[in-house]
Image (cartoon, rainbow, N blue to C red):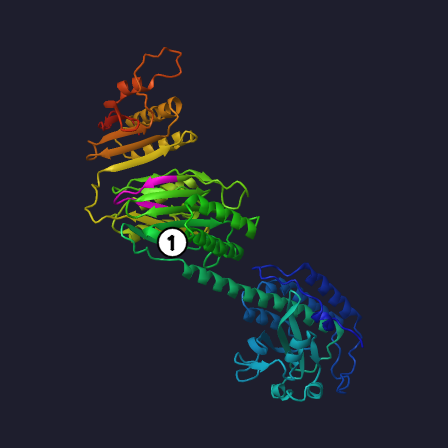
């Protein structure tokens, strides 16, 4: 029995992935070149098997080549169609008087039945309607193709009646006289059947069968992508619904969250947030970002999020949770990494135990609206270097009326901003408004990031960047709120964290962002650095810095205290010109309005105070 191009389609597995907007493989063009060659070699049409005679003339080679050229030029467009209906409409453009393609239908295979997924050119009420459903065991050409994976070509009504007597009448009343049923194959599996119906008899020469085969492969690609898109949509919708949108009902803490997908086209990508109720009234707050914006990133995110939840429920501390999550991610995908912040919060005290894995630092908003980037010790992103899971834990106390913001980098960089300009935009949106309106703060942040930039076209939105996850947590109290004109900064620098000096300087400058005299800010930073440096150089203890700003603007007072557990009290010396140390207390005496050293039950505290001076006049710059 002579084999044709169409007969082979059931055994030739097509590499049709679910990736979006993938152009047809190069093999399509090669096959079309072969079809054009077949057109030039096709002899005049053999008499159709029903004995119609030579009235159905062969397709002239020139006309066939024109149609093949049309398919070649339209092939990429068909393969990239956004919907099955659009693809069938484009295929209908192959109609020619000697190739009278008049109707199409795509059947899907679902639980042992055929169902119509889409049609073009059929009138309502026929077998190709969307409501069509037929058992696979039925003696219908499409069912046979679905069972065997081999194309069926029916050149006339008589052949249809002879080969499929039980169902030929389904098509006999449609004023069509030839039919081609071709399998739609992806990854070597038949996932559907394409029906092409013709107004007049067609002999289905070798070149015509090859042309229909290539077209069916394009339609299979569109069908597979549509299925993948629906699966991605269902996955992302389910993941998004699983993320909590309201804060936990815990006395002492309020939480507001937002999630906006902007980069990958899905309803959710690799970003996530979570709040997890822990034993003894504690709360775990998590925010993370898996590398990538595709459905694979969303799937990894779902598994990683579940793992973090499980490790937290087992009672592990923040460092252990991140270390285990890192090893877990490595087992899932060695080529992807994730950033994350994990916080174990005690609502009764406001203490936050924080571990960070390569994630952007959190931001602290004081009751008066001042925003500080809180530099948290951290380790490598999850899954980046197996065996190097070391995540130090920092402790931060959240005071009444203070708000801590956790976010993914999309909030900072969306819309083409760098880390600096993006931070300024976020700070300006985060600062205003009453502390009681946590949801309003979240809305302002989202609006500032997603609203069009000045000069953008009307209706445009800044959705060209990474996905955005946002989590705000506020310390509440049944007592009256602290004074709005009081600010506080608390941080600790360990003996092995010399880089913390730079972070302390940055946070102190942020605390004094609106101080009237910039030179006084520089003085405060210098003196605080000296006190912390003395602790790190002359003791083997950690240094703890606390800074307070009190009073009305223009008449404020800064108090900075540095405490350590060392027993030796400092004493003032007169260093020589070449001395490398001994200037700390001398600087305090010259530059501070007040200073002192007081013993503590364990250790000592060195402190200084500065009163806000009026702004300089006479052309001074800020």
Which residue appears at 72% of the width and 61% of the height?
30
The answer to whether residue 50 of the structure is visible from this angle is: yes
Outermost top residue: 576
Which residue appears at 48% of the width and 45% of the height?
323
Identify the image quadrant of the C terminus: top left
Is residue 398 covered in magenta?
Answer: yes
From what the image shows, is residue 185 above or below residue 607?
Answer: below
390 horizontally vs 9: left or right: left
The one nearer the camera, 605 or 53, is 605
Which residue appears at 28% of the width and 41% of the height?
366
Q: Position of residue 44 (x, y in %)?
A: 79, 77
Give the quarter of the image for residue 219.
Answer: bottom right
Give the secondary structure at mark 1: strand
The answer to whether residue 337 of the structure is visible from this angle is: no
Is residue 378 covered in magenta?
Answer: no
Q: Position of residue 249 (x, y in %)?
A: 30, 56
Label 1 crowd (10 A; few <14 / some 14-19 / many >=20): some
Q: Position of residue 59 (x, y in %)?
A: 74, 75
Q: Position of residue 472 (x, y in %)?
A: 34, 49
Q: How many marks?
A: 1
The one nearer the camera, 272 or 294, is 272
Q: What's the magenta region?
A: 394-405
Give the quarter of the image for residue 86.
Answer: bottom right
The one nearer the camera, 129 or 189, is 189
Q: Which residue is mark 1?
A: 276
Identify the image quadrant of the N terminus: bottom right
From what the image shows, is residue 31 above or below residue 121?
Answer: above
């Amino acid at each position: 029995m002579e084999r044709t191009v169409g007969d082979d389609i059931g055994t030739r597995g097509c590499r049709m992935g679910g990736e979006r907007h993938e152009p047809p493989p190069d093999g399509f063009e090669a096959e079309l070149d072969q079809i054009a060659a077949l057109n030039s070699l096709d002899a005049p049409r053999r008499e159709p098997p029903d004995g119609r005679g030579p009235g159905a003339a062969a397709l002239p080679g020139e006309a066939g080549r024109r149609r093949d050229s049309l398919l070649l030029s339209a092939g990429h467009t068909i393969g990239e169609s956004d919907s099955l209906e659009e693809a069938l409409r484009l295929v209908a453009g192959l109609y020619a008087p000697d190739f009278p393609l008049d109707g199409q239908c795509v059947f899907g295979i679902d639980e042992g039945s055929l169902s119509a997924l889409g049609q073009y050119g059929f009138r309502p009420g026929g077998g190709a309607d969307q409501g069509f459903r037929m058992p696979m065991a039925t003696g219908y050409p499409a069912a046979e193709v679905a069972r065997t994976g081999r194309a069926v070509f029916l050149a006339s009504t008589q052949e249809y009646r002879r080969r499929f007597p039980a169902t030929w009448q389904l098509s006999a009343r449609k004023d069509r006289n030839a039919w081609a049923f071709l399998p739609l194959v992806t990854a070597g599996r038949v996932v559907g059947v394409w029906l092409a119906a013709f107004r007049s008899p067609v002999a289905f020469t070798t070149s015509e069968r090859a042309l229909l085969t290539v077209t069916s492969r394009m339609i299979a690609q569109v069908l597979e992508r549509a299925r993948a898109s629906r699966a991605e949509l269902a996955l992302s919708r389910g993941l998004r619904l699983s993320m909590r949108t309201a804060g936990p009902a815990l006395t002492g803490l309020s939480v507001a969250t937002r999630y906006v997908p902007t980069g990958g086209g899905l309803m959710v990508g690799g970003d996530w947030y979570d709040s997890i109720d822990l034993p003894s009234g504690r709360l775990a707050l998590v925010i993370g970002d898996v590398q990538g914006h595709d459905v694979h990133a969303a799937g990894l995110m779902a598994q990683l999020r579940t793992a973090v939840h499980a490790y937290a429920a087992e009672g592990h501390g923040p460092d252990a949770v991140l270390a285990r999550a890192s090893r877990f991610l490595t087992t899932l995908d060695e080529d992807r990494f994730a950033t994350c912040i994990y916080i174990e919060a005690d609502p009764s005290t406001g203490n936050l135990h924080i571990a960070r894995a390569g994630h952007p630092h959190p931001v602290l908003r004081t009751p008066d609206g001042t925003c500080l980037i809180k530099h948290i010790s951290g380790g490598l992103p999850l899954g980046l270097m197996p065996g190097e899971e070391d995540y130090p834990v920092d402790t931060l106390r959240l005071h009444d009326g203070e708000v801590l913001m956790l976010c993914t980098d999309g909030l900072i960089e969306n819309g083409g901003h760098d880390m600096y300009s993006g931070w300024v935009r976020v700070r300006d949106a985060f600062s205003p408004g009453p502390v009681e309106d946590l949801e309003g703060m979240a809305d302002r942040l989202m609006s500032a990031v997603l609203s069009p930039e000045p000069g953008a076209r009307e209706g445009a939105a800044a959705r060209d960047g990474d996905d955005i996850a946002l989590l705000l947590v506020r310390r509440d109290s049944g007592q009256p709120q602290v004074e709005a004109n009081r600010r506080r900064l608390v941080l600790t620098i360990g003996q092995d964290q010399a880089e913390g000096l730079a972070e302390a300087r940055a946070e102190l400058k942020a605390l004094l962002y609106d101080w009237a005299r910039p030179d006084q800010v520089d003085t405060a930073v210098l003196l605080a650095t000296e006190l912390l440096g003395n602790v790190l150089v002359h003791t083997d203890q950690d240094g703890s810095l606390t800074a307070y700003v009190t009073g009305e603007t223009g008449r404020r007072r800064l108090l900075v205290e540095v405490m350590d557990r060392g027993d030796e009290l400092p004493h003032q010396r007169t260093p020589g010109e070449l001395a490398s140390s001994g200037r700390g207390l001398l600087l305090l005496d010259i530059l501070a309005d007040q200073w002192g050293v007081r013993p503590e039950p364990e250790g000592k505290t060195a402190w200084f105070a500065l009163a806000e001076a009026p702004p300089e006049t006479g052309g001074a710059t800020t």
